Amino acid sequence: MSSVRFNALKETVNRKPIEIFETERKSEIFGRNVFNEHAMRQYMTKEAYESVMNAIEFGTKIDRKIANQVAAAMKDWALSKNATHYTHWFQPLTGATAEKHDAFFETLGNGSAMEKFGGGELVQQEPDASSFPHGGIRNTFEARGYTAWDPTSPAFIYGTTLCIPTIFVAYTGEALDNKAPLLRALQAVDHAATAVCKYFDKNVSKVNASLGWEQEYFLIDSALAISRPDIYLTGRTLLGHSPAKGQQLDDHYFGSIPNRAMSYMRDLEQESMLLGIPVKTRHNEVAPNQYELAPIYEEANLAVDHNSLLMDVMEKLAGKHGFRVLFHEKPFAGINGSGKHNNWSLATNTGVNLLSPGKTPMKNLQFLTFFVNTIKAVHDYEELIRASVASASNDHRLGANEAPPAIISIFIGSQLSAVLDELENVTKGKLSPQEKTDLKLNIVGKIPEILLDNTDRNRTSPFAFTGNKFEFRAVGSWANCAGPMTTLNTIIAKQLKDFKIEVDELIASKSLKKDEAIFNVLREYIKASKKIRFEGNGYGVEWEKEADKRGLSNNKTTPEALKAKVSKKSIALFEEMNVMSRVEIEARHEIKLEEYMLRIQIEGRVLGDIARNHVIPTAVKYQNTLIENVSGLKNIFGDEFKKLGKEQIDLIKKISSHIEGINSKVEEMTDQRRKANKLKGQESADAYCNKVKPYFDEIRYHCDKLEMMVDDELWPLAKYRELLFTR
Ligand code: ADP
Ligand code: MG
């Protein structure tokens, strides 16, 4: 083993888990560093408190006088917790979070100073932040960017900084971030769903989308990761021979959590608790050194913020524990990748989960309404749903060699399939009394209240109904949930809006009763959306053929998938629902394409570097040893050396051919990169995808072969077995 690797391994093995002291109950520390309702009540006037609560619930504006009061209260609270700085915390289009800290501290001019924070600083800031991607929105100098307070996500203290969640918009009004469109989508779905709820319950005045994400990740020792420029710079391994033992034995999944990982998780959970992130579940995942963490679900905007915050906390804490956390969707070839299932549902302010079957036929009709509309929406916009999770890294999970196809389909389970099949046969128009009774008692009435046990069996579906929610499983572990949540809630809003119009028309023009009209429309939806439903093995090749016959899209790569974002249909959708303007959509599309191109470009460069600067020199060194050996044999044994040194001579030749392979392929790849760099937008992304990326596997092939030939003593890069099995 090379000394670099040996020392790294020694460091890894000798690391002790950090001791974590949990002296208080979770329920006691939960939300301690959050300016939540409890803290607001304590620090704010009644007037200010009510004003903020109204803003949260109904989106009402907060006037300047109140904003000053809120700011003063926030400052007092933050200072009581030893905060020294504040920041507008926002989510630019990089997908990560951004912050620029300012001290509360101000000088007063007479040599003294005090802590200050007013309504002005709370409500709006101009961080400039002109280096974030904006897709052309800020090309004119007037288009300054500013951040504006989002009162629906509470401020929190992280470290010694008061963080105020904000949206990030251009002076011209266009959103420059992920949060603003999400908030608009959530408002759209609220309006549309509330209107539909009125058919069933007049008391409903608000519908919240909820989100419960499940974050998968790998923990790799940082000393080992350091020897791998690919892990450091791209978040994944670009080469590495598969180890003799991988995940064949399934012995990691739900196994006992290794001590160091456990200590990391406990630390992370404490920090999450303080920040009000309700993390609940932790376990080992399928791959070695892979784990999962899931919270209790929350209102979608808050859940999205919490996931972004958590990912940030995870990276920071990993350093403290001697780990590097990998969010990449496929850090290791041949080993399971990571996803981030987005569990989604809709809930009313009267406390009803609209995707949970109820006790009465009426409740079940409401459930069916939202259930069928969701299926219809995903059916109509399947390409857009696929586009919403497209990224260079997630391409490894969708549509790649070892991955399931990139086809969007919905799994609902056999019981609900049977219900929908029966509903398909409902008579058109008016129903006879017999039929009504039959429907209510025998079809709708028979939807079991608890579906949970029967629905969660198919783990291969990208979009599965799991008893009381849909689980959008195609979301990548590295993704910001805002993108997929914006798309999903927008298409649902549009669908529910159309549904309401159709039902109302039937009631008015054909004088159908409300239930009859609902059944009629649902029946048509069930028929129209049949092709999106698939109960079989979503990972099989047969499904690809079948889906093709059905006319479902199968966009395997990001450049291909992203096209749906800027289609006429997509622009019409987002504009109609007031979620994004054409300019905002096109800007995001441009940014996504560019990000794709840059990520592949970086991977190509890193791979080229490692292959030439690490792999080839090592191979040459070993080859020299072999050559010395052979010439020594020749000196001693004369012509007999050919027989005695046969293996070595073969190896020398093989090494040469792999070195040659690497050199020529790296050269060709570099050439293609140069060409791709001259192109722009779609063409550049296409070139990186189809002309540059295919070299990765070829170069890797030669490198991995050399890894198996070269003396272990010389190999400088941490091997798969070391990265995956040390803890
Ligand atoms: P798994 O998918 O691993 O079997 P569960 O189905 O128990 O796990 O739950 C996964 C996630 O679903 C959790 O984050 C949970 O909070 C979330 N969840 C449960 N109910 C809902 C709901 N009504 N809306 C959104 N998310 C939910
Ligand atoms: Mg799940």
Image (spheres, rainbow, N blue to C red):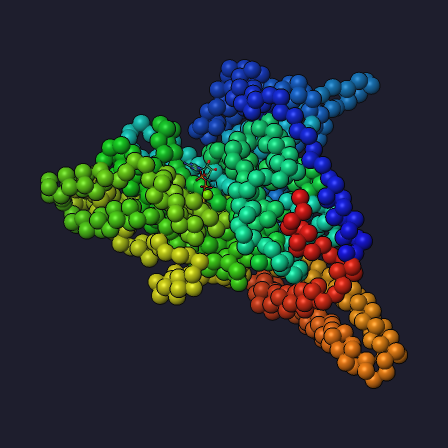
- Above or below 563: residue 82: above
Give the position of the N terminus as an image quadrant: bottom right
Out of 366 and 495, give the one closest to the viewer.
366
Residue projecting furthest to the bottom: 639
- Above or below 250: residue 184: above
Q: x%, y% of residue 691?
A: 60, 69
Task: Say left or right for 515 vs 13.
Answer: left
Q: x%, y% of residue 550?
A: 34, 62
Q: x%, y% of residue 719?
A: 69, 56
Q: x%, y% of residue 617?
A: 79, 66
Task: Say left or right for 578 vs 641.
Answer: left
- Above or below 495: residue 119: above
Task: Say left or right for 360 vs 174.
Answer: left
Exactly how many numbered labels are in the figure?
Answer: 0
At 48% across and 45% down in the image, what residue appears?
A: 341
Residue 505 visible (yes or no):
no
Out of 236 and 595, give the one closest to the viewer.
236
Out of 523 and 175, give the one closest to the viewer.
523
At 77% across and 22% down in the image, what residue appears?
A: 107
At 77% across and 80% down in the image, what residue appears?
A: 643
Residue 30 visible (yes or no):
yes
Q: Quadrant of residue 234?
A: bottom right
Out of 518 and 141, give the one closest to the viewer.
518
Give the position of the C terminus as an image quadrant: top right
At 36% across and 64% down in the image, what residue appears?
A: 546
Task: Say left or right for 705 vs 521.
Answer: right
